[in-house]
Structure formats: C-alpha cells, structure tokens
Image (cartoon, coloured by chain):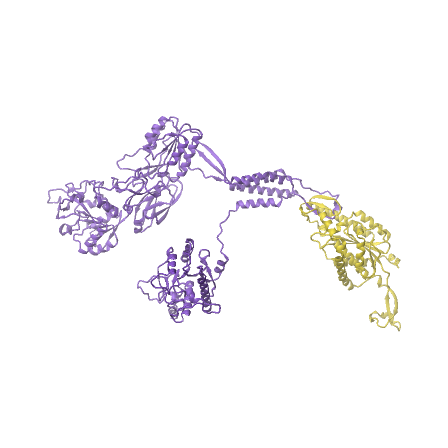
Chain colours: A purple, B yellow
C-alpha cells in the first residue's frame, strides 16, 4: 500500500497573479523609499553639515524576499489549494486483478465511494496494462471474466445496489474456477463488512463466506476495502402500549451516530418522528415512536433519514399492525374467580400482540359499545345465545370485513344460535371423563391449507370435551384444525368480507388444556392476523387451500426508494411456509409491496430471524484498507495564517529597523493592498437580511391601515379614500390615531407591519403568484387580518359573481379556518361601538368571520364570546370602502343604498369595530366582566 | 512638506515670485502697513513719551486762545505774565530701512501667517509711517532720499518699486552709514554670519547705529520634519540629503543658535538692537517692540553722541 498525495487548486487561473511577483520584486527592490523633499531657506547655512545618519539606499534583500513570500502565499491562498491524501490499495499488486464488490443493499450508503474506489483500481490496473475481472455478488451467474479496463468500467457502472441480500456463497464455484485459471491474479474485495444470516428454516447454518473463501485463495494476495461505519438498518417494529417500538441496528459498533426515524403513511406523509443515538459501543437501539394506535395503523413505512439503503426503510403491512380485539363474555363482570373465567385466558393470550378491549356491561350493550370502537376482531368468549339485536350487528360487522372468533360454551352446546360456521350437533361430546371409555384426544397436525399450518403442537394439549359439527359435504373445507380422530376443533367460514371462526372448545381450561398451552397464543395470533382486508379477501376468494400469488406492486431499490418493480421481480407466495407470515426479500422477490395496492403485503430485506453481524475477516490473510478517503485538507486557512504571521514579522522588522534608525517607508498602496487582501480572505461574506424598504419602515413605525392594490384605478382610489375616511373617523372618535393609509402589493411589500389589510375584489385583478399567496397565507397565519370585500351584495343571490369566484380562487390554496356569519354575541360587535351589522355601500350582505368554538351547551352564559386570537380573515360583500370614502372636506364620495338608517355612520362604526378588534383581540370580551369584578371588589 | 509628485519646490517658488511681483503685492502690503501703523500709533499715544523733545527750549508769553494746560504755572507765578514752556523742537533724525526681498524671504510654511517678505514689508513700511509721524525722516536704504512727510508709505513703496532689484540682493548695499543715522535691517539674515559681522562692524565704526529685525518662519525655528528628507534651498542650487530629519534637528538647531548668537553679539558690541519676529505671530506686537527699541535707543544714546548732533 502506498500513499498518493495530490495538491489540487480550486481556482487555477488565480495563480496567474504570481506572474506579477517579479514586478513586485522590482517595485520593492529597485526603487528604495524616496525621501521627502523639503524646501528650506536656511539650507545655505547648513551646507557644510554632515547628517549623522543616512538611510540605506535599498531595503535589505531579506525584507524584500519576505514581502514577496507574503504576496506569493496570498496569491496561492486565493487560488484555493486543497491537499488530498489518498491511500491506494493495490499499487503493489501484480497480475490480473479480480475485483469483488459487495453490491447488496448494505453497500448503498456509500455506493458512490465504492464505485469511485473501484474505478480508481481499474484505472490503476489499466495504467499497468493489467486485465480486470469484476465480480458482483448479486450476480453469481455472471462469473468473473478478465476484460480490458474500459469494458470493466462499463461493467462497474452497470452494478448498483440490489434490494435484497445476495448470497455470497453462490459465487464460490465461479470464483474457484477463475482463481485456479489465473494463478497470478490478485484479489481486491470491496466489502460492506456485514454478514447477514437470514435464518431460513430448513437451511443449515451456513458456513461463513470467509471460511469458504480462504482455501480458494492459496497464494492470491487479497486486499479488503472495508468501510468504517456500518449502515443503519431498521430491523423490526413492535407495537407496545406506549407506542411503536422500532429496533434499529448496525453491524458493528463505531462512531457515535445520531439518527432520526420517520414514520410515514402510504402516501408518504410524515406521521411521527423520533430521534435516536448510537453510542460508541451500541449495535442495537430501540426507538419509541409515541403514536396513538389509530395512527400506528396507518404507518406504512419507517425510514431512517440518515440511511440510504433498502435496509433503512421498513415497510409495514396490515399483518404487522397491532389490532384491536374486542372480547365479550357473559361473565365479564365476574372478577371473583379469575382462573375460571375465559376472559383471563383470552386476554392473556392476546395482549402480547393486540389491544384487548373489554366491557363490563351486559353482552348486548357490550357488543354494541365495543363494536363502535371499530375492532378488527370480535371474540365471543362464552356467549351461548346471542340476543337478536346484537346478532344483527355482529353479522354486519362480519360482512364489512370483521373477524369474529367464537368459543364454545355449555350454552352454545345446548341451545345455540346459528352464528356458527358449521351446523352444530347439540349436546357435544366428552372424552375421557370418569365414566367414559375413551381417553382425551390430542390435536392432529395442522393441514397445509390451514392458517395454523406450521405451528408445532405440544403433546400435552388434549381435548376433553367439544361440540361436534354436523357432518356435511363442505365441512372439510371449513375445518382449520381437527383431532387425531378427525373431528373438527376449529372451523371457519367466510361471510361477506369477513370470517367467522369457531373454536369447538371453551376458552377456559374446563374442556381442554389448549388455553393453557403456548399453542393457544399462536393460534389466536394467526386468527387475529387474518383480519385485515387482504387476508380476508385471500381467504374468501381462493380459500385457504390455494394461496394466491401476489404480484409486486412497488419495490424498493437498493437505495431505499419505492418505485415500479423491475422486470425480474416475480410474484410472491404469501405463506410459503415461513412462520409468522414474514417474508424475506431475495433475488426474485426484491423488498417491496406485493399484492393489491390498497392492502399490500410488505417484504423487507430483513426477516424476524435475520441476524446482521460484522463480517469476521480475521481468518483471511488479507490487508484491510479503509474505504473512506480522508477529507481533503483545505490549505487556505493555513496559507493565510502563514501569510499573516510573515506579514507581522515584516511589520516587526520595519519597526525594528526604524527604531535603529533605518526609516523604511513601504509605500502606502502596497500596505493597503496587503491589508485588504488579508481582510478579504479572513472575512467571509455574511448573509444579510433583506433590508426593509423605506415604505415598510415607515409603516412599521406607525400603526396604519392598508389596502391591497388591485390594479383597478377606480377601486384603488375608493380603497384609499375609504381607509382615509375611516382613519379620520377613528382619529376623531377613538384614542387611536392611525397614520395615513397606504396601498400594498402583497407580492412585493412586507405585509407583517400592517395589522389589517383591506382587500377589495376586483374581477379584473389577476390571481397573485404562488409566492404572493404564500406570503398572504403567512401573514394570516402570523396574526394578520385581511378583510376580503367582494363588493357584490347587490349581485344576484343565486349566481356567483366574478368577484366571489376570484376570492374562491384566491383562498383555494390557503388554510382558511371554518367561517360563520358574525354571531350577535361575537366580540367583534362590541369592541368599540355596539353594532349588530357591518354595512357598507350595501347593508344586506353577510360578514363572515372565523367560527368560534361553541361551548358544550351550545349557547354560553357569557354575553360576549371571543376566540383565543383574532380572526385572520373577514369576508364581506358590502363594499365597505365605498361607504367609508370621504373627500377632503369630509363629504361622502360614493352613493350608498339607504337600506338602513344612518347607514354611512353605521358603516364607519362597523369599521371602527373591525380595526379595534384586530388591534385588541379578545380584550373587550374580558372587559364585560369588569362590572362584576368591581362589584366583587366593593364587597 | 513638499510632495514628491509635485514639481521641484524651487521652481514653484520662483514661479510664484514672478507671478506675485513686488508691484502686485505692494498695494496690499501698503494697506496692511497703514492699518498696522495706525493701530500701533494709538497704542503709542497712551504712553508717556520720553525723548529729545522733552528737553526745555524757552518760555514764551501765553497767547489768547491757547489751552490753559500749557501754562507753566511755576514760571508764571514769578511774574505778572502767563508763560508757556516750549520744548525744544529737535532737528529731525534720519532713519534708513532695509527690507530684504531676496528669494529666501519668499518662503512661507503652512503654519506661518504669511511669507516672510510680507511680514518684513508690512513691518518696515508701518515703522516708516510711525517714525515720520513722530517727526523723523525715513528712507529706504540705498533707494533715494528720505521722506519726512506726506503719504510716507506710498512714497516709500514707489521708491522701493523703482529700486526693486536692489532689494533682492542678499546683503544690503554696502555704503557708508553716516553718524546720527540709524539703519533698520529687516531680513531673515540667512547670509553667512561673517558677512553680517563684517558689515555691522563697518557701519558701527562709521558711527551709524542700527536695529536688526530677524524674521523667522516657524518651520525654520522648530524644524518639525520627520523621516527621510532632503533639503532644497530656494535661492541656491544646493541640496542636502539629511537622512532622518528627526536626527538632524538637534544638529540644525545648534547651528542656528550659533548663527543667532553671532549676530546678537555683533549687535551688542556696537549697541545695536536685536529683535526676532516669527512669522506666525501677530505683526503689531513686533512693530511695537521694534518702535519701542528705536525710541529707547535714542533715549539711551550716550550723551556725547547725543550732544554732537545739535
């Protein structure tokens, strides 16, 4: 391994300035500082005097050299030199080069770096005319072939991280063939440093690839390029009471790493976010997303923001959701004999993976109230006879996709209802009782088409008593579990979009030992996991016998981006035998979503049994080379600093020389230039906030009303005149003396300095740009109030006026609160005058304002109501400005419809109230209590 | 201080001298001299005058209409008549003024009020006016007959103009200074000390008396320069690289002290008076000082010399 260093320059053209250095030399060297000439009459008397000290004709050569050095350093620093320290792995390697590249998703995080490293190696090999063979672990079928560098580069570019974990051992045969054919070849392995054991069932613990590789190597030199940090991977989610626990891990400990985890729903919206931190020695972390259960159901994707690989994204499907299970029992209220209550066994078995909802009410009410909570599964523990109303509700529940799990009881055995999957034979049977010949029966192994297939049956599970099913032609199809003698123990029937499941035993240990076994938990888990649209649909359509092939809908690429599936992706069989319905991505089934787009099945790169470990490289006779190239060193600060030090030395020298009599006078321009150059390098340009325009500054210094310029001269004049009239009126009648009003352009002007904007709608006005709308939106969000005036109260009541249409367009993109006509008890009607309407030119248009939250009683006792803030929006159609508009002598400028007495005065009073409302908020609402407070104080 | 980029200072000076010839500046200078003379005259009036006019001449009979203060009561008390004591009306004294207008007198530093020549001319003309008002006869040395009345300043200025070249010499015209004549030399006295010593000695031996008013520019006194400097003379071609001006200052100042001391010693030995005027100081003070010395000089004149005149 050798170290290759390089000095690069960001702005090479600046180095041309170095050409001026000889000129500087000339300036500093050839022309010594020139003495000042003094006209001095007494000189005649002095001509014979010999000055004690004379200046040297030239500055010392070393001082000149120092200054040249300073100037040269500055020029070099400005050119932006960068020092790169590169470690090249294989300078010393000989012979053909075999480049093995880990191209699984684990390499995605630093894929560019890997590619650059590989490219560097290939180019190096090309320089030495060595052929290169490229081996990607994801393509065991494409064995390594020695190629020209160009072809190898093309191969390299075609590699990309794959969204599954490649099986490294698959390349061994090709590797063996290649290495034996090329005894001189040297090997470089750009590795991800991870060993992922997927723990596939049936597969023996695979021997690590490294141990398999070692005998192949013989004398081939091997360099391993290893990353410093492992990628962060989401390894699973667990629903807990407190929230969603997400486990994140990395292959090996290392640097402290902070990460944030984001939960998104199917449309990519962020539902929650949590931050986590890997300490030095941490390999696994669990992060809790405190999300309510309802939101948790929507979580479709968990992403590590800092990650950039398939593994940093965890796709969730319905089966991973924590479901809500409602449990109804006749003995629900009976808490005295806990061990005899089926509720105990059911809720204990369900609680690890589901949220159990119980009700203390009687069964009918309990069913009604629990079904209102939208559970996924309804468990009827020991209900023998369902009441009619409840039964209908349950049937609707099943039809809409619910899963009903019913347990037997003596009541059901006796006079049961017909909400069962199979007709039942009344009375049931008991096995192995004291007076019976036969012994309790064990469960038969689950059939392959049963949802319980794969569960191991403990030998101690025995059934003493059960309800028998009436034999029928379709009985077999409905049986999910049966005894060794063939009598069904669990039967199920698809109804509508849901499933009805019946356990032919009770949920308490009276009839069988099943509730005491772990099998019970697993069976319940599988039943509960059946709920959800895709499972039920699958069951209903094809029946449990024929598991559907689910076509890929969207797949992740190696970098963790969801996209359309590649052509090579094949449909997946959801229950191919792996337990817990968990599937692991492989070559044909990349990580992604399969099945129907609405309720897809998620396939991740890591299954619940997958283990991610650091690759054990100690066995290999290899040299380890870090993947990360050290960050290039920016030499600028160093050079500038050195120049500054030398400059200080120069100054010191000048002072010293002057002190001992040599008065060196560097010409001022040179010094100034040097100082400026230093300052320019040291001072970074600072971002400066946009300065306010004088208009904005003026408005910020005085309260004033403002209107939005519409571009229609007539309307703008009316707005100005109206606001001027209102301003005069306010100044005359209230303590507020606003400055003269101004017109603003929301696209240009700073709106934040105005408390109130009056915006008349002009049909001719163009819709403001998106940025202007965003500013308006921000203005309203940050406490500003806009009065939108459509000025169309006189318009036909049925048709939509162009002004109203424009207003709708305007407000379409903004977040507008719910509006209501100003209620009579709104604080707006009392802020200064007591008014009940807000007339303008017209008096019959309604004025809308942000709706207030009503109290529970609907009508509160308080005389005045106000929200917490000021309504950001007031919409009127009364053409307020026209009524407010007054001329210079106070004469009204516009005619108004005299529909109410003193309408113009009332319009102005309404305007005063609006202004006061925006300025004081809910202050007046509190003021109504003053008399009461005073009265109380008096006592 | 001269700027390196500007033309040579000597050329600048010569050009300005040509542009502002004596004829150009004389009207202004005469006006100024008149003003200074008037203000100084009023200052002199308040003083008790001592001088040759104080001595007794004769008693004469009091004439009707005369001011009663003029009556000498002591003499009148001895007689029936009223007498007036008349002072001796002395024969007019002749004073010569020489104003140096050589190239070095055209120097002016930024802190000075005006060129040395301006100060010299104003002082000289104003002094002439004062002296003529005091009954003396005043002339410009070597430029014509003394004047004893009329518009002194104008007449002397005309004389000066007519003999302009004479005043531009470094040294005053070397001609005999007769007894009872006084010579007032207004110059910067920057010619070599030996020349002056010889000149003063020569005149002193001839019996004449004199006053030296040395005009000094503040820069010449303080030598406030710093850094690498080269000195250039306004009248000669000489230049002197003095190196660091600060280091040169003490050298310069000791040289100038020696020069001044030599001049002063030469004056003292012949009972001449010696006065220095800095061109950044106001003129009236200098004029008062000069006039006072001239008058005092007359009163302290040795008796034998004084008697010889009458």
> Which image quarter is the C terminus of chain B in?
bottom right
Judge by depth and name the residue closer to the eye, A474 or A113.
Answer: A474
- Residue B292 visible somewhere in the drawing: no
Residue B264 lies, with reference to residue A922, above or below; the image says above
Q: Quadrant of residue B62?
A: bottom right
Residue A559 lies, with reference to residue B27, above or below; the image says above
Total of numbered circles in the picture? 0
- Residue B29 visible somewhere in the drawing: yes
Q: Quadrant of residue B282?
A: bottom right
Q: Quadrant of residue A191?
A: top left
**Which residue occupies 42% across, 70% down?**
A905
Q: Position of residue B170 (x, y in %)?
A: 79, 49
Relative side of A547 to A212, left or right:
left
Relative side of A98 to A547, left or right:
right
Q: Position of residue B126 (x, y in %)?
A: 78, 59
Q: Position of residue B40 (x, y in %)?
A: 76, 61
Q: Position of residue A287 (x, y in %)?
A: 34, 46
């Amino acid at each position: 391994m050798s170290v290759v260093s390089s000095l690069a320059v960001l702005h090479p053209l600046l180095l041309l300035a170095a050409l001026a250095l000889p000129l500087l030399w000339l300036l500093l060297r050839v022309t010594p500082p020139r003495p000042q000439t003094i006209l001095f009459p007494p000189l005649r008397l002095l001509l014979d005097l010999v000055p004690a000290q004379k200046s040297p004709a030239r500055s010392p050569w070393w001082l000149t050299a120092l200054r040249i050095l300073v100037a040269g350093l500055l020029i070099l620093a400005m050119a932006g030199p960068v020092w790169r320290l590169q470690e090249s792995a294989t300078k010393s390697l000989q012979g053909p080069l075999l480049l093995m590249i880990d191209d699984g998703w684990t390499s995605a995080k630093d894929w560019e770096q890997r590619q650059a490293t590989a490219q560097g190696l290939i180019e190096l090999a090309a320089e030495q005319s060595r052929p290169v063979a490229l081996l990607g672990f994801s393509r065991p079928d494409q064995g390594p072939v020695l190629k020209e560098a160009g072809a190898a580069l093309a191969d390299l570019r075609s590699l990309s991280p794959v969204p599954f974990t490649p099986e490294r051992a698959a390349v061994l045969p090709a590797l063996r063939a290649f290495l034996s054919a090329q005894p001189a070849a040297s090997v470089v392995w750009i590795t991800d440093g991870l060993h992922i054991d997927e723990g596939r069932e049936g597969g023996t613990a695979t021997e690590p690839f490294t141990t398999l590789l070692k005998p192949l190597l013989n004398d081939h030199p091997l360099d391993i390029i290893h990353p410093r940090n492992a990628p962060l991977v989401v390894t699973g989610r667990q629903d807990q009471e407190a929230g969603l626990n997400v486990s994140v891990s990395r292959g090996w400990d290392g640097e402290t790493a902070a990460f944030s985890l984001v939960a998104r729903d199917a449309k990519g919206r962020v539902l929650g976010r949590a931050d986590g931190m890997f300490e030095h020695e941490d390999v696994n972390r669990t992060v809790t997303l405190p999300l309510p259960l309802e939101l948790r159901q929507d979580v479709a994707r968990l992403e590590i923001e800092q990650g950039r690989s398939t593994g940093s994204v965890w796709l969730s499907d319905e089966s991973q959701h924590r479901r809500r299970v409602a449990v109804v029992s006749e003995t629900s209220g009976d808490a005295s004999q806990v061990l005899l209550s089926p509720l105990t066994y059911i809720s204990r078995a369900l609680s690890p993976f589901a949220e159990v909802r119980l009700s203390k009410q009687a069964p009918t009410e309990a069913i009604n109230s629990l079904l209102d909570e939208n559970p996924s599964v309804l468990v009827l523990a020991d209900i023998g006879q369902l009441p009619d109303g409840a039964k209908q509700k349950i049937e609707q529940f099943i039809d809409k996709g619910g899963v009903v799990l019913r347990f037997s009881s003596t009541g059901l055995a006796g006079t049961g209802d017909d909400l069962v999957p199979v007709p039942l034979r009344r009375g049931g049977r008991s096995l192995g009782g004291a007076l019976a010949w036969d012994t309790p029966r064990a469960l038969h192994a689950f059939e392959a088409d049963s949802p319980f297939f794969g569960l191991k049956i403990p030998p101690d599970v025995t059934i003493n008593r059960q309800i028998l099913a009436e034999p029928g032609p379709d009985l077999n199809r409905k049986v999910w579990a049966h005894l060794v003698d063939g009598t069904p123990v669990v039967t199920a029937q698809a109804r509508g979009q849901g499933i009805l499941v019946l356990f032919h035993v009770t949920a308490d240990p009276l009839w069988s030992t099943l509730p005491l076994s772990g099998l019970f938990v697993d069976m319940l888990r599988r039943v509960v996991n059946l709920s959800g649209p895709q499972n039920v649909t699958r069951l209903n359509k094809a029946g449990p016998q024929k598991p559907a092939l689910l076509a890929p809908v969207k797949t992740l690429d190696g970098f963790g981006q969801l996209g359309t599936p590649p052509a090579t992706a094949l449909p997946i069989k959801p229950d191919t035998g792996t337990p817990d319905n968990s599937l692991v991505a492989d070559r044909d089934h990349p990580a992604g979503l399969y099945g129907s787009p609405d309720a897809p099945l998620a396939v991740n790169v890591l299954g619940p049994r997958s283990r991610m470990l650091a690759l054990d490289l100690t066995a290999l006779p290899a040299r380890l080379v870090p993947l990360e190239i050290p960050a290039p060193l920016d030499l600028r600060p160093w050079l500038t600093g050195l120049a500054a030090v030398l400059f200080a030395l120069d100054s010191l020298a000048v002072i010293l020389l002057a002190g001992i009599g040599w008065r060196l006078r560097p010409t001022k321009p040179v010094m100034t230039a040097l100082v400026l150059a230093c300052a320019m390098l040291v001072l970074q340009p600072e971002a400066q906030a946009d300065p306010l325009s004088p208009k904005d500054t003026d408005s910020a210094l005085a309260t004033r009303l403002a209107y939005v310029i519409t571009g229609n001269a007539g309307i703008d004049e009316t707005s100005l005149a109206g606001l001027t009239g209102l301003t005069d009126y306010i100044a005359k009648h209230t303590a507020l003396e606003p400055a003269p009003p101004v017109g603003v352009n929301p696209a240009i002007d700073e709106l934040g300095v105005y408390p109130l904007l009056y915006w008349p709608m002009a049909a001719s006005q163009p819709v403001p740009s998106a940025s202007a709308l965003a500013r308006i939106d921000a203005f309203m969000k940050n406490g500003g109030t806009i009065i939108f005036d459509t000025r169309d109260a006189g318009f036909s009541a049925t048709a939509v006026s162009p002004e109203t249409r424009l207003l709708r367009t305007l407000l379409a993109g903004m977040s507008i609160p719910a509006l209501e006509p100003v209620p009579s008890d709104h604080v707006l009607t009392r802020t200064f005058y007591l008014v009940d309407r807000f007339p303008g030119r017209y008096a019959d248009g309604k004025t809308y304002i942000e709706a207030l939250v009503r109290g529970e009683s609907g009508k509160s006792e308080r005389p005045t109501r106000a929200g917490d803030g000021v309504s950001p929006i007031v919409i009127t159609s009364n053409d307020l400005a026209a009524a407010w508009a007054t001329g210079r002598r106070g004469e009204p400028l516009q005619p108004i419809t005299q529909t109410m007495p003193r309408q113009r005065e009332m319009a102005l009073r309404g305007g005063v109230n609006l202004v006061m409302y925006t300025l004081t908020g809910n202050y007046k609402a509190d003021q109504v209590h003053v008399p009461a407070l005073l009265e109380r104080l008096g006592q | 201080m001269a700027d390196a980029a500007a033309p040579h200072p000597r050329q600048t000076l010569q050009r300005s001298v040509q542009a502002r010839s004596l004829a150009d500046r004389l009207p202004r200078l005469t006006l100024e001299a008149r003003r200074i003379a008037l203000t100084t005259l009023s200052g002199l009036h308040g003083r008790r005058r001592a001088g040759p006019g104080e001595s007794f001449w004769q008693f004469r009979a009091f004439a009707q209409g005369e001011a009663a203060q003029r009556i000498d009561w002591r003499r009148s008390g001895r007689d029936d008549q009223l007498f007036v004591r008349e002072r001796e009306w002395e024969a007019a004294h002749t004073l010569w003024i020489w104003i140096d207008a050589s190239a070095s007198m055209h120097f002016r530093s930024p802190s000075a009020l005006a060129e040395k020549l301006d100060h010299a001319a104003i002082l000289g003309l104003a002094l002439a006016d004062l002296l003529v008002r005091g009954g003396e006869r005043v002339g410009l040395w070597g430029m014509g007959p003394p004047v004893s009345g009329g518009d002194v300043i104008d007449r002397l200025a005309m004389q000066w103009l007519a003999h302009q070249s004479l005043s531009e010499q470094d040294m005053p015209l070397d001609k005999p200074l007769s007894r009872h004549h006084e010579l007032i030399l207004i110059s910067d006295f920057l010619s070599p000390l030996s020349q002056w010593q010889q000149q003063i000695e020569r005149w002193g031996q001839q019996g004449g008396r004199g006053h030296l008013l040395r005009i000094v520019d503040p820069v010449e006194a303080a030598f406030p320069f710093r850094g690498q400097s080269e000195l250039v003379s306004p009248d000669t071609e000489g230049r002197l690289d003095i190196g660091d001006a600060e280091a040169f200052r003490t050298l310069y100042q000791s040289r100038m002290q020696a020069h001044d001391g030599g001049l002063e010693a030469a004056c003292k030995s012949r009972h001449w008076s010696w006065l220095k005027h800095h061109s950044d100081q106001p003129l009236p003070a200098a004029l008062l000082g000069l006039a006072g010395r001239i008058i005092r000089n007359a009163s302290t004149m040795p008796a034998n010399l004084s008697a010889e005149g009458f």
